[in-house]
Image: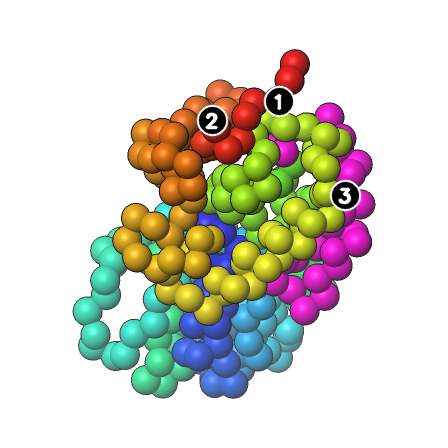
């Protein structure tokens, strides 16, 4: 899954491409929207909500295009005649506004909703780490409601707080010296962890290359994520990795055995 800051940047790209412009062509390449056409509609803008994107388009009615990148999706911007950087058969949405084209490739979700139904798409989400309405106290309350849940699961639960993916989960655990299997109720200062999560995403939301170490050099941008068997940047111990979660939905969990000792049974 993409991280919340990746989705935030996708929203900004869509704004730069389409915001304030009238659609001159609209092509939905998903069966359920094959006959939908928003040509002539004005794009009000795109908002990220956790890992979801809401593009508001006004025609004679108020519509919201709800998309989700899932694992492989991406929005890209093009000029007319410019060669696409992904195969055309993976395009799910093509929105054209004169000489501006936005293409959504391999999108996991493509829905067209009456504006008033937006809460049905994103109302279940917890506080958005990059939202204008970010609420630290509410995020903390939602995490505290699951004291027996492993931190690795709770941080990835978008109903607790929205925007953390596998990478930020691993990096947050490392920075706080916590093993991913540490129970939420055993975290010494949960508010500090929530605050650090917000800071990490906020610092990276405008960067093309994410970093949690502050070092943008190749191989040194992240503490543990996808660095299995490599030396910990802090102590030199080889980074460990394990697959966790229910069958079919496993995720890789990364940690330093020395900096993040396993919790006592």
- Image position, residue 73 (x, y; %): 39, 52
- Image position, residue 209 (x, y; %): 37, 60
Q: Is residue 219 above or below residue 179?
A: below
Residue that badge 3 annotates: 142
Magenta range:
126-153
Task: Name the mark nearer the viewer: 3 or 1.
Answer: 1
Marks 3 and 2: CB-CB under 8 Å?
A: no
Q: Secondary structure at mark 1?
A: loop
Q: Is residue 92 above or below residue 235?
A: below
Label 3 and label 1: CA atoms lie apart by: 22 Å
Q: Is residue 15 above or below residue 20?
A: above
- Image position, residue 83 (x, y; %): 19, 69
Nearest to the observer: residue 30 or residue 262:
262
Q: Secondary structure at mark 3?
A: helix
Nearest to the observer: residue 214 or residue 83:
214
Please report the residue visible at 59 percent of the width from the left and 26 percent of the height from the top. 181
């Amino acid at each position: 899954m993409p991280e919340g800051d990746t989705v935030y940047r996708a929203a900004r790209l869509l704004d730069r491409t389409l915001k304030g412009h009238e659609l001159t062509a609209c092509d939905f390449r998903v069966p359920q929207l094959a006959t939908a056409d928003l040509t002539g509609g004005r794009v009000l803008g795109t908002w990220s909500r956790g890992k979801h994107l809401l593009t508001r388009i006004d025609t004679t009615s108020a519509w919201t295009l709800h998309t989700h990148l899932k694992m492989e999706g991406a929005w890209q911007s093009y000029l007319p005649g410019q060669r696409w950087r992904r195969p055309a058969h993976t395009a799910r949405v093509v929105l054209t506004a004169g000489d501006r084209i936005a293409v959504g490739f391999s999108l996991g979700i493509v829905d067209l909703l009456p504006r008033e139904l937006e809460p049905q798409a994103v109302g279940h989400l917890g506080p958005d780490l990059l939202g204008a309405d970010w609420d630290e106290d509410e995020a903390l309350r939602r995490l505290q409601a699951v004291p027996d849940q492993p931190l690795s699961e709770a941080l990835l639960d978008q109903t607790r707080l929205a925007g953390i993916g596998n990478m930020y989960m691993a990096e947050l655990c490392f920075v706080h010296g916590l093993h991913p299997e540490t129970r939420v109720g055993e975290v010494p200062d949960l508010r500090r962890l929530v605050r650090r999560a917000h800071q990490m995403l906020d610092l990276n939301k405008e960067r093309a290359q994410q970093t949690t170490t502050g070092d943008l050099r190749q191989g040194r941008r992240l503490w543990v994520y996808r660095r299995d068997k490599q030396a910990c940047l802090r102590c030199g111990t080889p980074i460990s990795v394990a697959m966790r979660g229910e069958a079919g939905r496993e995720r890789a969990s990364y940690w330093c055995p020395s900096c993040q000792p396993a919790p006592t049974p």
